[in-house]
Amino acid sequence: MINEKEKEFILKELEKYENSDAVVVESLKFVQKRLRWISLETMSEISKIISVPVSKIESIATFYNQIFRKPVGKNVIKYCDGVVCYINGYKKIKNAISKHLNICDGCTTKDNNFTLIPICCLGNCDNSPTIMINENLFSNITVKSVVNILESIK
Amino acid sequence: MKNYFYKNEETHPLTWRIKKFKKPIFIDEYERKRGYLAFKFALKNLSPDEVISIIKDSKLKGRGGGGFLTGEKWSLIPKKNYFGKKYLLCNADEMEPGTYKDKFLMEKIPHLLLEGILLSAYAIQASCSYIFLREEYFFSKNLLEKSILEAKKKKYIGKNILNSGFNMEIFIHTGAGRYICGEETALINSLEGKRPNPRVKPPFPSQSGLWNKPTCVNNVETLSNVPAIILNGSKWYKNISKNNDTGTKLMGFSGKVKKPGIWELPFGITSREILEDYAGGMQDGYKLKAWFPGGAGTGILIEHYLDISMDFNSLSLVGSRLGTGICIAVDDKINIVSLLLNIEIFFSRESCGWCTPCREGLPWSVKILKDLKNKKGRIGDIEILEEICKNLSVGKTFCAFAPGAISPLYNAIKYFRKEFEDGINFNLPVVKNKISGIQSNNLNNI
């Protein structure tokens, strides 16, 4: 359920744009921060607030890869699979994460703590390989350091 | 080699203010270092047309990859305001693999971008600007938000700026993670809250863009160049470059080099100079095998071309592009087919699927590259890849996404055909003769 604070945020965002369609992405992202994913109910609630058809909201929600259509864990690990991280061996890092948490791409741990997904180049190539956990960027990752990072988050 | 490490205002218009590494520059320091002077000067002494003609004169080219003349782009915006509002969009949706220049500017010197936006908006008489920022740049977002508030307090943003009658609002709009949003018209669609598919041109955004109003889309680095040109003049700007492309460019090297990084350098410098003098050469135990001039969407080149001058024209003459100007070094331990597989997986994942050649062609190339990597390729596979390259080239698709996606593959086949041939298993039946037209799905049944 969308709470009052979120509703207020969405209505305030509307002031920035000429039409209400433009706030869809921002609204979805804001609500997703708390709920961790976007369900059909969430979409229909947003649709009521901004008077944009649910079908339109859904077409946007399914297009962007940072709008999650099924629940994700408390911490979302995004590993960069860009070409520079490829050269610097992102696969080893990814395998280390997968092995440590026992999850595959797009999966969530059983305790709902972590979700692992690939992401476009994070623009941190001079400090590659790199991963992002929630809003934090980690540079120059090694197989050893990534395990320490995951442990510190638990 | 001229040493460009020692920065000053004359030689490093973008970065001379950044002295202490890692610290962003906020408004007080920025103003102390001649910040917002150009904007104040333009508001007082220059008409919008004069600003446009100075930028036209300076021959500033768009730094987003296209390289279109910025002054020309601005002059396409209708002067008379028949349409109500005009918009200036700042393209900060930096997602090209291997690129980190816009992030650098936004994180180190956000006010330079804001001043650039204000000046450009004044030139085209836009009253509203959106910075389309990629979602993952959280740090940039915080800094820009803070900077906008600072600038508002000083009355650089808002209504009747510095009593000149010029109004301007700057908003930040963040995306939700799709590479295609960096394409000019897809960006406009995304901002409007539509699916970010590219639009048909014409009408061009300069006539009918965001909410059908005249719109100009410029990259972060392009806009950041504007204040210095207004302050120091177009003649100076032309002189700091070493060749026909004017001004400086953020260039860098990443990959297995000793000191990966980013530097402000004049056009015309060679990539060997960047690699050896700035990036410190390859790491011990690694040799350079190939390199990308500007992100993963530019044609791959071999060592032979390292002495080529880094500018729009020279690189296009050797079958590549300057792109974002941030080079990637590929070392000798990397298999080219696997590298290309990584790149094409990226592009096929990010294709918006709007037009058929891109939607069908890229996954097909991924499928073949996977086979070649696993030594299960068939005779004729390389020819099919070449055919895909041809069918996704410039003019065959809706936007520039597919030509960008396929150019590294095209060049890789040209320079490293042997490695592709190594992936072919000669015991498997020939495919080329069995394919009629372009039916990628049929490959499963052969």
Image (cartoon, coloured by chain):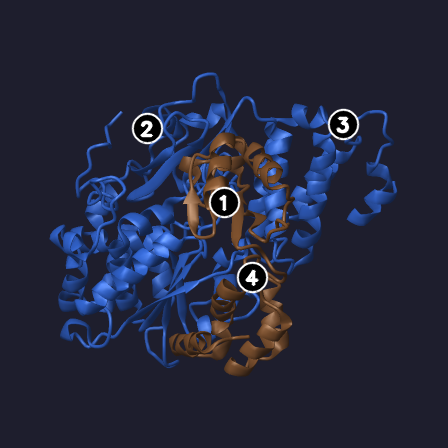
Chain colours: A brown, B blue
Q: Within the image, what quadrant is residue B41 found in? A: bottom left
Q: Determine contact: label 3, label 1, CB under 8 Å.
A: no
Q: Distance between the residues labelled 2 and 3?
A: 40 Å
Q: Which of B54 and B329 is in front in this view?
A: B329
Which amino acid does the dot numbered 1 rest on? Cys
Which amino acid does the dot numbered 3 rest on? Ile
Helix, strand or loop status at disc 3: loop
Residue B314 in sight from this viewpoint: no
Give the foreground label among 4 and 1.
4
Which amino acid does the dot numbered 2 rest on? Tyr
Give the foreground label among 3 and 4.
4
Q: Distance between the residues labelled 3 and 1?
A: 31 Å
* Numbered label attached to residue B271: none
Mark 4 highlights which residue? A67
Q: In which quarter of the image is the C terminus of chain B?
A: top right
Mark 1 highlights which residue? A121
- Judge if badges 2 and 1 mark residues of a common chain: no
Residues packed near mark 4 inside 10 Å, few (<14), some (14 to 19) or many (20 plus): some
Q: Within the image, what quadrant is residue B168 found in? A: bottom left
- Judge if badges 3 and 4 mark residues of a common chain: no
> Upstream in the sequence, badge 2 or badge 3?
2
Mark 3 highlights which residue? B424
Helix, strand or loop status at disc 2: helix
Q: Which of B180 and B410 is in front in this view?
A: B180
